[in-house]
Amino acid sequence: MYGLKHSASGAKLTILVAQCLYLGLSGYWLTTGNQSRLLTWTMAGCLAVIFFRLNAMMFLWLPRGIGWPEALGNSLAFALYYLGFPLLLIHGGHFNLVAYVLGLICFVAGSLINTTAELLRKPFKADPRNAGKLYRGGLFKYAIHINYFGDVLWVLGCALLTSNPFALLIPLMLLALFIFSYIPTADRYLADKYGAAFTAYQRETKELIPFIW
């Protein structure tokens, strides 16, 4: 995942096709379910935003190398979002005003944090004069993995929208994945690549959650 410059042939296409299949199935479930129409359209809108953001990032805004292990892993992970949340909404979900409002706030905030952090970093990474330099600007001055924090927030937002307590397992699993796998792996890669610069960055900056950890 880290340091890969070229995609395996068809890896990105596999992710895109998997997402389209997931969306088609979740769309069918949502339109044939008996849940609140407001929740139906809200969830459908959130899934559309997720689809646009993920694919715009992958193909347009921040194209990077993706290998087959990451492509297959991402395709399976996306099933939790595209299929899991609609299923949990239909089976055991209900409308709760407080959860609905909090869910929308978390979803919008998380989506903005994740996308803004990446797009603010893009010009720095694209400038040849910054080759070999560690980026600490934009939203990344608040947390080393602020983009992951955005992911946790928008996933939590989707879970709250369902008002199904079992849906909270999805953001909890994602948080655990970041803490115990993605962040340690990323930190080792960054430490090897940037050395003392990253050591100082890690000492002076929170890992994931601004002002907390």
Image: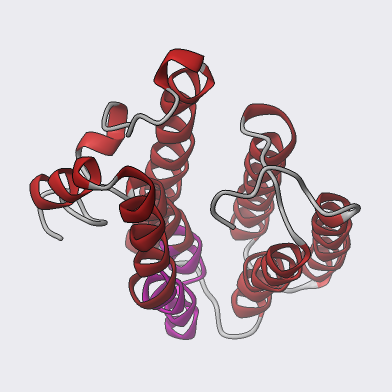
Query: In this image, 113 relative to 46: left or right?
Result: left
Q: Quadrant of the N terminus?
A: bottom right
Q: How many marks?
A: 0
Residue at point 88%, 63% (across, down) = 21
> x and y percent of residue 3 in the render?
56, 49
Query: Magenta: predominant secondary structure element?
Result: helix
Q: Nearer the viewer, residue 71 or 16?
A: 71
Q: Is residue 84 above or below residue 166?
A: above
Q: Is residue 80 above or below residue 43?
A: below
Q: Quadrant of the C terminus?
A: bottom left
Q: Nearer the viewer, residue 182 or 85?
A: 182
> x and y percent of residue 132 in the render?
40, 31
Residue 83 is inside the magenta segment: no
Residue at point 72%, 70% (across, down) = 69
Q: What scheme was used to colour the molecule? A: secondary structure
Write down the region rendered in magenta. 156-178
Residue at point 62%, 56% (across, down) = 43
Q: Does the image show residue 77?
A: yes
> x and y percent of residue 58 in the render?
69, 41
Residue at point 47%, 43% (across, down) = 111
Q: Does the image show residue 101?
A: no
**Residue 32: quarter of image:** bottom right
Query: In this image, 185 relative to 46: left or right?
Result: left
> x and y percent of residue 197 in the render?
21, 40
